[in-house]
Image: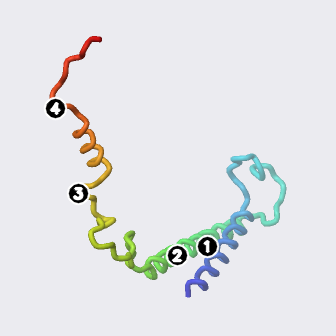
Amino acid sequence: MQSVIIIIHLMIVAALIGVVLLQKSEGGGLGIGGGGGGGGFMTGRGTANLLTRTTAFLAVGFFLTSMFLSWLAAYNRGPSSILPTGAPATQQGAPSPLTAPTSGGLLDTLKKADEQQAPSAPQAPQSR
């Protein structure tokens, strides 16, 4: 089903590109194909209306297929989680990877070492 809609979507895209390229430029943003005379492949008022209507029809088709494809992708997506569902059990006594350790961390070890090395009272410098 999804592949059929994608193929239809791509056909609409190709047709839309072709129809837009067939239209006569009226602006002159780059100055190409603008106000100068010269006949083109399709000229005249009737073909301009036909190409404008075809562009509008293809644009609506492009919009609808895009919306349907996004709805289909969201419909087929299941619930997801950033946490692994089959996480291996932790060892007895080891901290869980999801909880912060309460003691025994690097900072606690450094704090204990600093407390053991620090003198109990300030001492005056001694001269030699």
Q: Amino acid at mark 4?
A: Ser
Q: Which residue is mark 1?
A: 58
Mark 2 against mark 1, which lies toward the viewer?
Answer: 2
| Front disc: 4 or 1 | 4
Q: Which mark is residue 102?
A: 3
Residue type, label 3: Thr
Q: Which of the two marks, 2 or 4, is nearer to us in this view?
A: 4
Q: Are marks 2 and 4 in contact (CB under 8 Å)?
A: no
Circle 2 crowding by C-alpha within 10 Å: few under 14, some 14–19, many from 20: few
The first of marks 3 and 1 along the sequence is 1
Q: Quadrant of residue 124?
A: top left
Q: Residue furthest right?
A: 38
Secondary structure under tag 4 reads: loop
73 or 43: nearer the eye? 73
| Tag 2 residue | 64
Residue picked out by circle 4: 120
How far across and how far down the image is residue 87, in percent?
A: 38, 75
Residue, x 53% and y 73% (percent of image)?
Answer: 66
Q: Position of residue 6 (x, y in %)?
A: 60, 79
Residue sitting at 69 percent across and 53 percent down? 26
Pointer 4 or 1: first along the chain: 1
- 127 or 39, nearer to the observer: 127
Q: Earlier in the sequence, mark 2 or mark 4?
A: 2
In the rendered structure, are the residues bearing label 2 and label 1 in contact, judged by CB atoms less than 8 Å apart? Answer: no
Q: Secondary structure at mark 3?
A: loop
